[in-house]
Image: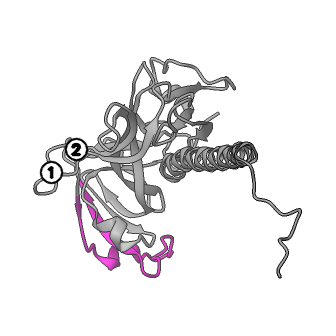
């Protein structure tokens, strides 16, 4: 005869309900923790994206604007701080021989890809230490031809260096002043930086770079390249005038008084994080770029 075991019984309905409620509360807490963690990671990623956008704009601006010459390197500066057009050097060297209508120059080595880019806008030279750079634009008749005669750079006193892997070029045009042998000379492209409507992020602001005198590639109808986006609509350019250490909102009437610029790159994240978010993540960066060859 088997006796039934006493003292064992199943869970009551009330115990099951209480257990399920406790388990649901624990699971809900874990789920909220995971959601918050995911939001934090997403916010970090968006903030990192905004900082990367600002940094990409900084790298390009520093590399190109840092070579702009003070006297005539700025062609146009917008009063609203949204655009700046500069004469950006892409090749530098020395004068071998000059006449009233021609310069033979020895140029330092230039990256072949950079040299091959379209958009030659003119050349400039300096006739003396206290004389500002003189510019001759392509629109004003300045032309570039190569190769030039090496014999023009070989003189009795050997005053002009023929750079290894460099170039000898002929620059033609009516020169307002004739530079001496050994004077610095540069070739430049007109480049416009501007904050305007983004194509990559419709309704947002992008930083655009346009080589003004470069022809449009086949099939392209809009000039310029969107180099970084998106930015807040407060992104802008401010101007350092003469010895004033504070950047101004408006450029001077005489652009030769410009000594540098401050670019406010107020970058934004690409996306809003979702419900409950306070909008795009932002990374405000301001960088100052001072121009070369300032006379004061």
Using the image, determine if residue 42 lies above or below residue 95. above
The answer to whether 221 is drawn above or below residue 231 in the figure is below
Q: From this view, report whether residue 11 is shown above or below residue 204.
A: below
- Residue 152 appears in which quarter of the rendering? bottom left
- The stretch drawn in magenta includes residue 193: no
* 92 relative to 201 in the view: left or right: right
Outermost residue, right direction? 7
What is the quadrant of the N terminus in the image? bottom right
Q: Which residue is mark 1?
A: 220
Q: Position of residue 242 (x, y in %)?
A: 61, 26
Residue at 51% in and 41% down: 269
Q: Report the disc number at residue 223.
A: 2
Q: Is residue 136 left or right of residue 11?
A: left
Q: Are marks 2 and 1 in contact (CB under 8 Å)?
A: yes
Q: How many circles with numbers are drawn on the protein?
A: 2
Which region shows up in magenta? 144-172
Which of 17 and 189 lies nearest the eye of the viewer? Answer: 17
Q: Secondary structure at mark 2?
A: loop
Please indicate, yes or no, whether residue 191 appears anywhere in the rendered image.
Answer: no
Label 1: how many residues lie within 10 Å, few (<14), some (14-19) or many (20+)? few
Q: Nearer the viewer, residue 121 or 83?
A: 83
Percent x, y for residue 208?
Answer: 36, 42
The quadrant in which the C terminus is found is top right
- Asked which quadrant contains residue 143, the reply is bottom left
Residue drawn at x 50%, y 36% as measured from the top left = 274
Whole-percent x, y for residue 188 in the image: 36, 52
Tell which of 15 and 56 is nearer to you: 15
């Amino acid at each position: 005869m088997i006796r039934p075991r006493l003292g064992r019984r199943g869970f009551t309905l009330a115990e099951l309900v209480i257990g399920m409620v406790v388990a649901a509360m624990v699971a809900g807490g874990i789920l909220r923790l995971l959601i918050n963690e995911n939001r934090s990671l997403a916010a970090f990623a968006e903030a990192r994206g905004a900082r990367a956008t600002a940094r990409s704009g900084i790298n390009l601006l520093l590399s190109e604007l840092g070579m702009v010459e003070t006297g005539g390197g700025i062609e146009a500066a917008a009063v609203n701080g949204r655009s700046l057009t500069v004469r950006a050097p892409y090749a530098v060297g020395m004068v071998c021989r000059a006449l009233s209508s021609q310069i033979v120059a020895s140029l330092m080595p230039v990256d072949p890809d950079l040299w091959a880019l379209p958009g030659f806008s003119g050349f400039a030279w300096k006739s003396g230490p206290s004389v500002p750079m003189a510019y001759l634009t392509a629109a004003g008749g300045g032309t570039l031809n190569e190769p030039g005669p090496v014999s023009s750079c070989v003189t009795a006193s050997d005053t002009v260096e023929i750079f290894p892997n460099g170039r000898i070029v002929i620059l033609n045009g009516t020169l307002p002043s004739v530079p001496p042998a050994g004077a610095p000379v540069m070739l430049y492209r007109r480049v416009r930086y501007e904050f305007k409507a983004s194509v990559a992020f419709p309704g947002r602001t992008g930083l655009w770079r346009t080589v003004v005198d470069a022809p449009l590639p086949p099939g392209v109808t809009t000039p310029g390249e969107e180099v970084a986006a998106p930015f807040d609509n407060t992104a802008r350019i401010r101007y350092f005038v003469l010895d004033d250490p504070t950047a101004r909102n408006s450029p001077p009437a005489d652009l030769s008084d410009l000594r540098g610029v401050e670019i406010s790159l107020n970058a934004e994240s690409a996306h809003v994080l979702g419900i409950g978010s306070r909008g795009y993540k932002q990374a405000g960066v301001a960088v100052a770029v001072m121009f070369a060859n300032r006379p004061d």
